[in-house]
Amino acid sequence: MAASDGKLQVYQLLNDQRAGVGPETSNELKRMIAFGQDEREYLKFPLAVGLKWTVNYLHRSPGRTPRRRYIDFKITGLEEITTSAGTFRAYRIEGSATFVLSSRTVHQQRIIHYSPDTKSIVSFYYDSAIGEPGAKVEIKLKKFTPKGKDVLTAK
């Protein structure tokens, strides 16, 4: 992720080269690190096990009338999560949403792991239609360098 002209740009690294990502992945990443970019509040500080909140946002789909949707979030516990960047103690934040789309009920799920050690989200999972075809997005922290630590590289 990089900033250009004050706007976030999202990409993935493939063989040390930048490659584009789809709009759903891009939007989710922007929401995770640029808090306040839209109405979807994935994190609510201060975090505490048992905390619950509901997000109310206007969803716009091409060719459809914008509709209000709701996501219920709850912090279900602290657990260890391992990514290629290491193992981190993290809050498990579960988000669920249910809404009617073209006369069928759709269930969505988000699982977010926020680490107070990295002060970041270390893992994010989104399923746009549980049990049905739909977007499935999984994002994990790939590298972490603690603040104030020098990184040494061999030449």
Image (tube, helix red, strand yellow):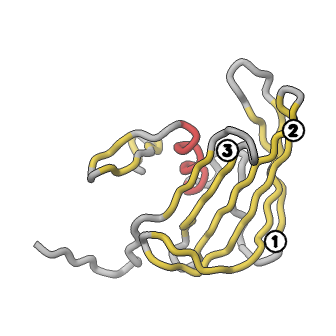
Q: Amino acid at mark 1?
A: Leu
Is 154 left, or right, of 151 in this rendering? left
Query: Looking at the picture, how far across and down is residue 109, in whole percent?
Result: 74, 53
In this figure, which residue is indicated by the disc labeled 3?
Answer: 38
Report which quarter residue 42 is drawn in: bottom right
**Do the residues bearing badges 2 and 3 touch, measured as CB atoms within 8 Å?**
no
Give whichever of discs 2 and 1 has the lower sequence position.
Answer: 1
Q: Amino acid at mark 3?
A: Asp
Residue 139, placed above or below residue 102 = below
The 10 Å Cα crowd at callout 1, few under 14, some 14 to 19, many 20 or more, is some
Side of 151 where 112 appears, left or right? right
Whether residues under marks 3 and 1 lie with C-beta atoms below 8 angstroms apart, the answer is: no
Q: Which residue is denoted by mark 2 in the rendering?
A: 105
Q: Amino acid at mark 2?
A: Thr
Rendered location of residue 140, percent (x, y): 51, 62
Q: Quadrant of residue 49?
A: bottom right
Give the answer, above or below, for where 47 lies relative to 29. Answer: below
Q: Which residue is mark 1?
A: 51
Q: Nearer the viewer, residue 7 or 137?
A: 137
Q: CA distance from mark 3 to mark 1?
A: 21 Å
Of 82 and 66, the residue lying toward us:
82
- Whichever of labels 2 and 3 marks the residue nearer the N terminus, that label is 3
Image point (68%, 49%), residue name: 127
Can you name the residue that lies furthest to the left here? 155
Residue appearing at x 62%, y 56% in the figure? 125
* 148 horizontally vs 37: left or right: left
